[in-house]
């Protein structure tokens, strides 16, 4: 497989987006391929880190955005492209 | 639909847009500007035609705003002063954010910024915004396989970068 295709397959596997049959094939391959298993382990660590980086919007931002929307609503609709 | 419905509908997606904007902006103040610009553009779009998929619509507006030149062309959102904000507003993180490990989050943020923009964008849309690869592909006009490959490469690179900093599996 070309590297990008292999990456796409392993990416789909980790995202839970592979059909069952292909998922089973990947898992079977991972039993014997040290290199792919290391890739999958590393990608899992990377994803876990990203998922922990999520944060709620600050309250002050919520107030600021709603104030900006209120101010915009007080003006007549414009014709600029969004 | 009315502006009231707009507020009700989009308001619940502020965290989603903020997390995307945060990953598209180097600093928190820039991210907050981008969020405001996104919602003001969304209001204009809503008045023309409310979307079917609000989440994808908002994120697409945010992506387009981040790619645009609004910061430099003085389409910067009009300043709306927050009467509740202190003078240190932008540097005061709210308590919920502080409750999570801020140091780790900052390390991950810095590591994400060492990835190519396309990888950072795809990772954010899938991991933090919860879109499928097909949805990200549609939003960005990129083949699904390319999105998945970018995310996979980005994850591996992130793990390597964080390991170099002594951060393993999201812990310090």
Image (spheres, rainbow, N blue to C red):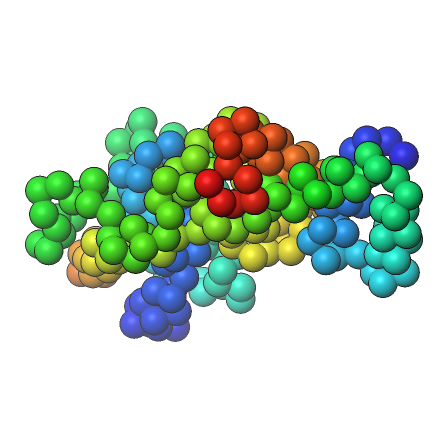
Q: Is residue B82 visible?
A: yes
Q: Is residue A13 left or right of residue B33?
A: right
Give the residue at x 37% y 40%: B103
**Viewer-proximal residue among B129 and B104:** B104
Measured from the top left, where is residue B41 in percent x and y? 36, 50
Measured from the top left, where is residue B18 in percent x and y? 38, 50
Give the residue at x 41% y 61%: B13
Figure quadrant of residue B44: bottom left
Number of numbered tags placed on the structure image: 0
Q: Is residue A76 visible?
A: no
Figure quadrant of residue B14: bottom left
Measured from the top left, where is residue A58 in percent x and y? 27, 53
Q: Is residue B90 left or right of residue B107?
A: left
Measured along the vertical axis of the image, is residue A75 above or below residue B25?
Answer: below
Give the residue at x 63% y 39%: B155
Q: Is residue B95 left or right of residue B163?
A: left
Measured along the vertical axis of the image, is residue B130 above or below residue B122?
Answer: below
Measured from the top left, where is residue B168 in percent x and y? 55, 40
Measured along the vertical axis of the image, is residue A59 above or below residue A50?
Answer: below
Figure quadrant of residue A11: top right
Give the residue at x 88% y 48%: A31
Q: Which quadrant is the N terminus of chain B positioned in?
A: bottom left
């Amino acid at each position: 497989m070309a590297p990008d295709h292999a990456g796409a397959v392993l990416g789909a596997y980790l995202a839970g987006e592979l059909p069952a049959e292909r998922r089973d094939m990947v898992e079977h391959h991972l039993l014997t391929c040290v290199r792919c298993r290391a890739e999958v382990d590393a990608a899992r660590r990377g994803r876990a880190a990203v998922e922990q980086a999520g944060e709620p919007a600050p309250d002050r931002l919520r107030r600021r955005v709603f104030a900006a929307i209120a101010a915009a609503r007080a003006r007549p609709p414009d014709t600029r492209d969004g | 639909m009315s502006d009231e419905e707009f507020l009700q509908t989009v308001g619940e997606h502020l965290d989603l847009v903020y997390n995307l904007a945060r990953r598209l902006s180097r600093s928190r103040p820039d991210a907050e500007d981008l969020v405001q610009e996104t919602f003001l553009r969304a209001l204009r779009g809503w008045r023309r035609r409310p979307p079917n998929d609000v989440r994808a619509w908002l994120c697409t507006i945010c992506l387009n705003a981040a790619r645009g030149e609004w910061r430099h062309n003085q389409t910067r959102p009009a300043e709306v002063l927050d009467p509740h904000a202190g003078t240190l507003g932008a540097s005061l993180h709210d308590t919920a954010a502080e409750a999570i490990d801020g140091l780790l989050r900052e390390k991950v943020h810095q590591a994400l910024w060492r990835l190519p923009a396309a990888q950072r964008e795809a990772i954010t849309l899938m991991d933090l915004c919860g879109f499928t690869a097909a949805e990200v592909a549609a939003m960005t006009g990129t083949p699904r396989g390319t999105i998945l490959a970018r995310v996979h490469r980005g994850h591996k690179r992130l793990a390597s970068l964080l390991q170099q900093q002594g951060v393993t599996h999201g812990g310090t």
